[in-house]
Image (cartoon, rainbow, N blue to C red):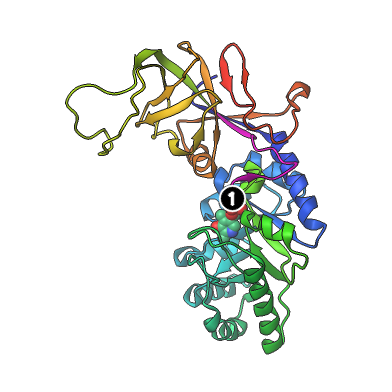
Amino acid sequence: MSTPEISIDLDKIAHNVRTLKKLYNTRGIAITGVTKVMSGNTRLAKILVENGLGILADSRMTNIKKMWCDGVQAKFILLRTLLSEVEEVVKYTDISLNSELSIIRALSKAAKKTKSTHQIILMVELGDLREGIMPIKLNHVVRTVLKLQGIKLVGIGTNLACFAGVKPNERKMRQLSSIANDLEKKFNITLPIISGGNSANYNWFMSSPNLGRINHLRLGESIFLGCEPLNKDPISELFTNAFTLHAEVIESGVKPSTPYGEKGLDAFGNKPEFESCGAIQRAILAIGKQDVSTEGLTPPIGITILGANSDHLILNTHKMSLKVGDKVAFDLNYGSLLSAMHSNTVTKNYVQATNDRRVLPNGRGKRLISQTTISNN
Ligand SMILES: *Cc1c(COP(=O)(O)O)cnc(C)c1O
């Protein structure tokens, strides 16, 4: 194993895709796999497609182009549209999410030039204050969009729980449904796609007796990490440990718990405080902020992370005495996963489950220590 390494269990991801698809489809909601966390990785994209997702979405054209060129057999939705990329958007994507008329006009021009039709979903602001048209301006935007050549308005959508953590609850979803109904009536159109949000819509979906007009969700985190993002609760029947990050011990032994000597700032300009608890078992791992966002790593039970700099992660291993060369396995949150998948210093290791690895979902927190790997799963 060349470390740091992230192991990616393709079968667990496949299981999550199938389970979520079935769950949402049963009540009339289509799901699109959001691939941005995996950097347009073709192998992972193909797993999503093979397990029933015909449409993939990404925020970046580079990722979509990569999947397109690698022959991923899917339709593509662009989540974030740039004025400077409209030609590529029209060429490589089927649908884009939009909230600015100037960009939609440019898309129209680009589509006309290639004699094609580009489909758009208009994003509506419902309070999270990232992308979206303020509801009061929607009539004007729709009226304008309907006159543009080369552009087909196929739906509206919203994105909550991202920038500000505003929950996509019953009230917000009803608001989106009624906006859809109003627009259809006012302009005598049909909006086939009402895209209610992302993985954070799980609790709304599970608790709402009436889903209204919402018939589409864009899912990233729940597919890959098996959890609901607002409370980080595991979703039942899903694997939460499809990804595991391994790093190698380069120093291990008993040292004091608090630094000694005259103190200034650390390497990142902070003044860290350390709890004084006498001498402790410490280990240094060969992984740092340069490789991955270390704040989102969860160590195995019995180990705590004391801190990190660019190349080192410092652990308190409590009762365990690790050996130089041991590998320690970490779970990752979405932010850490994003950084690890985009890191060119983290080796990607794709694993297919063999029979003995077919553990049940939600195995997070279980401790298994083999000879060389200290692991969570
Ligand atoms: C990232 C993103 C998603 C997916 O969010 P998850 O929480 O990972 O499911 C959906 N929609 C938009 C617009 C996004 O940017």
In magenta stretch: residue 93: no
**Residue 58 appears in the figure:** no
Where residue 213 sits, quadrant-wise, is bottom right
The picture places residue 179, in percent across and down from the top left corner, at: 65, 79
Q: Position of residue 211 (x, y in %)?
A: 75, 67
User: For the view shown, which residue lies furthest in the left direction?
Assistant: 262
Which residue is depicted at the point 73% across and 59% down? 207
Regarding residue 307, the answer to whether it shows in the image is: yes
Considering the whole magenta stretch, tell me its main secondary structure. loop
Residue 325 vertical placement versus 367 (above, below): above
Question: Tag count in the figure?
Answer: 1
Q: Residue furthest front?
A: 277
The image shows residue 295, relative to residue 30, as above or below, that is above
Q: Is mark 1 within 8 Å of ligand 1?
A: yes
Q: Nearer the viewer, residue 113 or 183?
A: 183
Question: Quick one: 352 or 180, which is closer to the camera?
Answer: 180
Q: Quadrant of ligand 1?
A: bottom right
Q: Which residue is mark 1?
A: 229
| Amino acid identity at mark 1 | Pro
Image quadrant for the C terminus? Answer: top right
Instruction: Please name the residue shown 65% across and 47% down the image.
Output: 222
Q: Taking 104 as reference, is 11 left or right?
A: right
SS category of the residue bearing label 1: loop
Q: Name which quarter of the figure residue 175 lies in.
A: bottom right
Residue 14: percent from left, percent from top: 73, 40
From what the image shows, is residue 166 above or below residue 282? Answer: below
**Residue range (magenta):** 229-245
Using the image as rendered, state which of residue 211 and residue 22 is in the foreground: 211
Mark 1 crowdedness (10 Å alpha carbons): few <14, some 14-19, many ≥20? many
